[in-house]
Image (cartoon, rainbow, N blue to C red):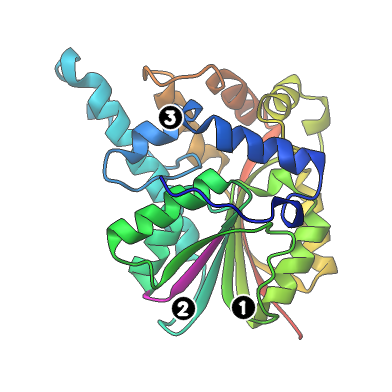
């Protein structure tokens, strides 16, 4: 595995960022769900899934049941990434895209294969950068898909360099005003930002013990739904599409409860989604002005 030796002090600027990076650098195999699912076809994601499962995964011979479940869970997480890419708009081979919080690179590779353009991924985990760049070399696309040890709050890329940017379940680790300020700087006028995220319902999310449990378990800062739209408005990002994916993700979580990969997080997620305190949203927004 390729490991890097950058100046970590210029990337990890708070004790919180250092703690998050340390976890992923020192415990990469703790993420056994995403690793196992990625081994199905070599496309490693760091997010959850959407869509109706094929119930045949639960039927058939018992000795191959887990294999069927893993393949089906992976199909659903890849379907989620496909939906995200569907909302990036008209992307040409000469354009440049940014994957904010790129993990092991799954969605970046899908974007390059689909659009033929350059994709840059940024993550504060040196382990993930090494893993993803090794994957790029293995896939023969290292000249077009590159992963960088950089902070998505301050990427260092040129102003207006990106036609499209996405985050996939990473915004709960950062301040949204800082993030959208940087993304607005990076996007060319008319460029597109797409976000898929879990967020708390402004009406009752703050009182939900399940949302609090998820927050504490992942060491994140789940934002209220309204905070996304407020921060976007402050930084010239105008939402053009908002899709509530909550109902579409519940079957994924229910299927995970049937797998040997279940970790115990399934119940709080299902409770929070079904009681309406937690929502799973896709937001696509265009950059207006300069």
Mark 3 — residue? 33
Q: Which is in the foreground here, disc 1 or disc 3?
A: 3
Q: Is residue 186 magenta?
A: no
- Give the mark toward the camera: 2 or 3: 3
Q: Position of residue 238 (x, y in %)?
A: 72, 71
Q: What secondary structure is the stretch in magenta mostly built from?
A: strand
- Where residue 53 appears, as percent x and y from the top left, is 34, 35
In the image as oriented, which residue stretches furthest toward the left? Answer: 61
Label 3 SS: helix
Give the distance between the C-alpha atoms of the residues marked 1 and 2, in whole angstroms.
10 Å
- The residue stretch that appears in magenta: 116-121
Q: Which residue is mark 2?
A: 91
**Side of 75 where 230 appears, left or right:** right
Q: Against 113, is 128 above or below?
A: above
Residue 273, image x, y percentages: 61, 31
Tell me, yes or no, whether the two marked residues, 1 and 3, touch with CB atoms within 8 Å: no
Number of numbered discs visible in the structure rendering: 3
Q: Residues within 10 Å of mark 1 (few under 14, many from 20)?
A: many
Which of the two residues, 51 or 79, is positioned nearer the viewer here? 79
């Amino acid at each position: 595995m390729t490991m890097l030796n950058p100046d970590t002090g210029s990337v990890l600027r708070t004790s919180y960022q250092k703690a998050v990076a340390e976890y992923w650098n020192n415990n990469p195999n703790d993420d056994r769900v995403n690793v196992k699912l990625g081994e199905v076809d070599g496309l490693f994601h760091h997010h959850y899934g959407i869509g109706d499962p094929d119930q045949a995964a639960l039927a058939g011979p018992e000795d191959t049941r887990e294999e069927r479940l893993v393949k089906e869970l992976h199909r659903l997480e890849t379907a989620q990434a496909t939906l995200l890419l569907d909302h990036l708009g008209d992307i040409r081979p000469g354009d440049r895209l940014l994957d904010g919080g790129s993990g092991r690179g799954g969605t970046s590779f899908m974007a390059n294969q689909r659009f033929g353009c350059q994709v840059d991924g940024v993550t504060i985990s040196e382990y993930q950068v090494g893993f993803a760049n090794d994957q790029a070399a293995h896939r023969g696309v290292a000249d077009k898909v590159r992963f960088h040890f950089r902070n998505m709050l301050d990427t260092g890329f040129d102003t207006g360099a990106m036609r499209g940017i996405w985050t996939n379940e990473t915004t709960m680790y950062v301040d949204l005003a800082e993030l959208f300020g940087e993304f607005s700087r990076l996007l060319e006028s008319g460029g597109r930002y797409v976000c898929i995220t879990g967020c708390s319902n402004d009406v009752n999310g703050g009182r939900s013990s399940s949302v609090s449990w998820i927050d504490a378990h992942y060491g994140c800062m789940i934002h209220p739904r309204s905070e996304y739209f407020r921060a976007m408005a402050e930084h010239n990002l105008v939402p053009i599409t908002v899709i509530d994916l909550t109902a579409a993700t519940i079957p994924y979580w229910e299927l995970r409860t049937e797998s040997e990969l279940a970790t115990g997080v399934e119940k709080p997620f299902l409770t929070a989604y079904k009681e309406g305190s937690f929502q799973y949203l896709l937001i696509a927004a265009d950059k207006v002005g300069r």
